[in-house]
Amino acid sequence: MVKERMPRIHLLRNGQFRSWTRFRLCIFILVVFFLTNIAFGIMWLYREPVVQESLAKKKNDIYKNAVESHPPRLDILTEFKGTSEELCSKLRSGYRGITSVEYSDSGNSEEDTIVFTYLKTSFPKEIDFSKLKPKNEVFTKGNGYVEVYDRYWEQLTMNLRSFIALAGQAKIGGKRVVEPKVKSSVFGDRNGMPLGTYFYMKHFNEILAASNYATIATHDEYRAECPSDDPEHVNIHFLYSQKGESFTRAKLKLNDKEYDEISAKARKTGWTVCPKLKNFIQDYSKGKQICVNTEMYKNWTKLEKDVIRGAKCVTIGHWRGIGGNYRTHFSEQNFKIKARDIQYALKVPSSILNEANEFENSKIRGQYIAVQVRGERVVIPHDLPRLRSCLRLLSETVNALKKLNDIDKVFVASDMSSYGSGSWEDSLKKELHNENTLSDIHDFLISSIDGIEYKPTRKNLDQGVVALTEMTIISRGRYLLTIGSGSFQEWTKAKFLEHHRHDTTNWSLITMCSK
């Protein structure tokens, strides 16, 4: 009996074993399938957009999904290879100073590390107004005038710096500079608005006088003192070299032969009479037309002696400032205060101050973090993927500062907004992009940090007014984070540092992705 049951018991145990094995195999397959789907989902969430030129519609959808797929939570973003506590510790180390945050640029984006560097704080130069003697010097008429006739060729910051540099040279000749009209950050637009739209003019003139620069004359004064039919009026056309040669030729509307003839004559003695240009400055076409070689005139006193020759009224056809190959080369070594320092010390008018105050009182109320993004200056030396990485890193850093300081408001100014840079089209030529690229990236920037933007009213739509209003708001932030670089950003950082010069509370300037 026993011998007959044993095989049956053995068979039953084998059957149970096979059933258990099959059950465990099924569980294993389900677990692998589940984990694979999770891994695929994570990879899909953080994928870089795959854009194929032949699939325009798919390119838009993929890019949009890629941008919108990055949530603003610090614990999910992984640009900073560390914990949130470690990031907060690094941010605390930079309080009341400047912190530089840069990618190591190993050449392999997967291996790039983020480097924190703590820099010595360099506040803007303080100008001593007590040197202004006598005070009525600001408003007295000068012995002569210098006007720029054509539009300045750059944007707000560099146009302003070029204008201040001209004021320094005009002082050498005992002249005043004529106020340029302004419009959408352009200087010299003859249909523009008064310079006082951008700056507090009384303070502007006081700073110029205190710095031993020429002060500013109005257009009305210039017209009264320099009649258009004056044959002694001197019109100067600078022949800018190298990079500026094609610009100069086009500006003067000369063909190659005409320009080469004038340029050759100017190279011999430094200047030459060029009557063909009498119609370029139509307002003073009866005056003397003189072309000047910028390489041979590096001293304004020499220009006064050889070219201006005591003339009371001088008009410069187009002015590109002082500096590199495509500018003039007049010396600024004897100026104790540089044009850049004067620029940083300027104040905006009450109209912009009131606009900034109203925005803060109605939209922010209380302490806030300020963010300024110059994305174009990241894309040009790198590419769009680097800009996206920088924005993710910015999101991590801002959200860490929020938690660290119990601040929930973030003000954002970006060159990707509808009031931002006008040169993005050229910067994106080498990048795969579509018509929604900038707006999508900008939307991610705003949503990832819950940012607040300044929306100008109809009366404040001028690009220069918007920029200066944003600068004013940014300067008052508790923390300032910047991405990119550029002259306007340097100006904004100087205003922020000046605002916090004597601040003993926690504040910091954090520059990111500036190389």
Image (spheres, rainbow, N blue to C red):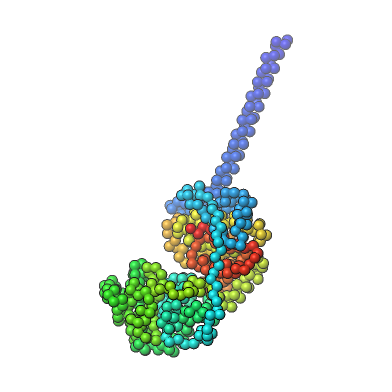
In the figure, is residue 277 to the left or right of 86?
A: left
Percent of width and height locating residue 293: 33, 74
In depth, the one of 190 and 178 nearer the eye is 178
Q: What residue is shown at x 70% (from left), y 10% (from top)?
A: 3
Which quarter of the rendered picture does the N terminus lie within?
top right
Question: Would residue 488 appear left or right of 283 to someone viewing this image?
Answer: right
Closer-to-camera residue (121/510): 121
Q: Quadrant of residue 266?
A: bottom left
| Residue 419 image position (x, y, % from top left) | 52, 68
Residue at (43, 62) in percent of width and height: 426
Q: Quadrant of residue 101?
A: bottom right
Q: Is residue 459 left or right of residue 5?
A: left
In-image side of 38 versus 297 (left or right): right
Answer above or below: position of 269 versus 101: below
Whether residue 409 is visible: no
Q: Which residue is more in the foreground, 82 or 294?
A: 294
Q: Residue at x 61, y 30 (%)?
A: 25
Residue at 54% over, 52% down: 114
Point out residue 421 in the picture as x, y percentages from the top left corner.
49, 66
Q: In this rendering, does residue 488 appear at all?
A: yes
